[in-house]
Image (cartoon, rainbow, N blue to C red):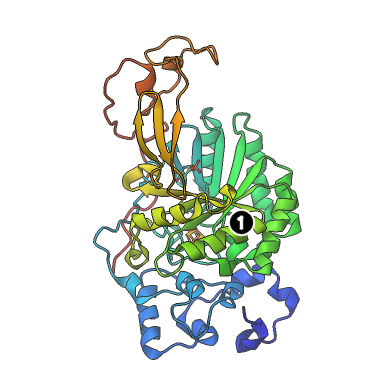
Amino acid sequence: MRDYREIPMWAEVTPERWNDWRWQARNAVRDVAGLRQVLCLGREEEEEIARSLDRFQMSITPYYATLMDPVDPRDPIRLQAVAQGAEALEGRYEMADPLAEDANSPVPGLTHRYPDRVLFLLTDRCPLYCRHCTRRRLVGQPEETLPGHHVEAGLDYIEHHPEIRDVLLSGGDAFLLSDQRLEEILARLRQIPHVEIIRFGTRTPVVLPQRITPQLAGMIARYHPVYVNTHFNHPRELTPEAVAACGRLADAGVPLGNQTVLLRGINDCPVVIRSLVHGLLKARVRPYYLYQCDLSQGLEHFRTPISRGIEIIEMLRGHTSGMAVPTFVVDAPDGGGKIPVMPNYIVSMAPGKLILRNYQGRLCTYNEPVGGEDRTGGGVCSTCGTDHSGMAAQGVGTLFYDRSLTLDPVAPAPKGDSAPHRVLDSPTPIT
Ligand SMILES: *Cc1c(COP(=O)(O)O)cnc(C)c1O
Ligand code: SF4
C-alpha cells in the first residue's frame, strides 16, 4: 500500500479529506489520464484500456488506487479495477443478464426468485466498478438504469407479499446512498411485520472503507437484525482501514459475511483463498459464498473451470477451521439460482451403512440406526406432529413426502402481479 501523498495529484490532500468518503467517491479515477497518475502505463496498455472503456465505465476510488502495484500489470488488485483489452472481446457464451434477474423482476430493481426472499437493488452506482461485475448491464452504465424512484415500487411490492421474510439490499452499492436515505428505507422495511431480516450486499468495506462511519454503523444498529455481506476477493484487500471498517460494523452488532468471486489470475488458487479466509475471520467476517464467475459480458478472461473451485474447497475443508470454509456456488444461467458444488465425500452406501471419506482420504464407515421412521408416503411426523406432504410447495424434497414417482421441471414463473419487467429496454451495445 502506497502513501497517497507520493501520488502528485493527491500530494496536497489533507488526511481529513482523504478519509472523507464523499471526497473519495468524487475523486475516483475514471479515465486513462487519471490512471497515468497512479500507474506506469505503456502506450499499448493505454490504448487497450481506452478501448475497453468504450464498453464499460471505469471508476477507482483513490484509496483502492493506492493498493495497486504501479508497475505490475498482473497485480491482483489492479486486475479487479483497471480495464483490460480482453474486456472488449465478446465471449462465446456471454450474456447481458446471465442470471435472468430482469426476467424474474416484478418491479424494476427487485428480483423475486426464491420463495421467501428478494434481491432489491437500490442504486446502479458503485464507488468502484469491478471489472468482474456480474451486473454490469445495469451497474455503471452511462445512462441511469435505476433512477431511484423505483425504490417506492419495490417497498410496495414487499409490503404486499407476506411470504417475503428476508430482504437483500444491494446494487450497485447500497452504501452509496446517504445515511438519511438508507434510514428511510430501513425504517419502511421495519414497519412491515413479515420482514424478519434485512441484509446488505456491499463492497464499500473493500473499496471505500471510509464509508463505514460510526454514524452509519450506529444507524444500522437501530434496525436490527441487519446483516452485511461484503466482497473481498484477495488477502491484500484486508488493509488496516478495511479491517477497521468491518470492525465498526461488527461492534454495532452486525453479523458480517463475505462473498468472493473466483477470478483467473487473481484468486484461483488454494493458497490465496486460504490466506483470504483466515484474514477474514481475523476481521470478524465469516466467509459465506465462493462464486463461480458468471457469464456476463466481457468476463471470459476471468473465468475458471468449475473444477478449480472444487479443488480449492478440497484444500480447505478439514484442513482449516470449518468457519473459514465458504460454500462454493454456481449461479446457474437463466435464473437457475445458486447451486452448491463441492468435493464428493460419500464413497459408497448400502442399506444400513455408508462409506465416507475424510479430508485425509481415510475411508470411514457409518452404521445407520436400525428401524428409522419412514416418513415417506405421507403420515404425521412423530417429531413435529405435522404431515410433511403439505409442507414443501416445490422442489426435490416433495418426492419424499408425496406419492409422485418423478418430478418434472417447471418453467420459473415470474412472481408478482405484473408482467416481468425488463430494466434495460435495449441490450447493451457490444463494440
Ligand atoms: C443470491 C440471491 C439471493 C440470496 O440467496 P441466499 O442463498 O439466501 O444468500 C436472493 N435472491 C437472488 C435473486 C439472489 O441472486
Ligand atoms: S461492487 Fe458489486 S455491483 Fe458494484 S461493480 Fe462491484 S461487483 Fe458490480
67 up-or-down from 256: above or below: below
Q: Position of 279 compared to 125: left or right?
A: right
- Rate crowding at label 1 as few (under 14), some (14 to 19) or many (20 or more) other CA atoms within 10 Å: many
Foreground residue, 288 or 412?
288
6 up-or-down from 353: above or below: below
Describe the element under mark 1 as helix, strand or loop. Answer: helix
Of the 4 image quadrants, the one containing the N terminus is bottom right
Residue at 44 percent across and 34 percent down: it is 365
Q: Residue furthest left?
A: 92
Q: Name the spot of residue 34 as percent of width and height, x first.
A: 52, 82
Residue 309 visible: yes
What amino acid is found at the position of numbered circle 1 in the picture? Phe
Q: Position of 214 compared to 427: left or right?
A: right
Q: Name the spot of residue 407 as percent of width and height, x first.
A: 28, 26
Of the 4 image quadrants, the one containing the C terminus is bottom left
Q: Position of 220 compared to 121: left or right?
A: right
Residue at 35 percent across and 61 percent down: it is 304
Q: Which residue is mark 1?
A: 175
Q: Is mark 1 within 8 Å of ligand 2?
A: no
Residue at 70 percent across and 53 percent down: it is 249
388 up-or-down from 98: above or below: above
376 up-or-down from 395: above or below: above
**Displayed quadrant of residue 105:** top left
Q: Name the spot of residue 61 as percent of width and height, x first.
A: 57, 72
Foreground residue, 189 or 260?
260
Residue 106 visible: no
Q: Residue furthest top?
A: 379
Residue at 54 percent across and 86 percent down: it is 37
**Displayed quadrant of residue 298:** bottom left
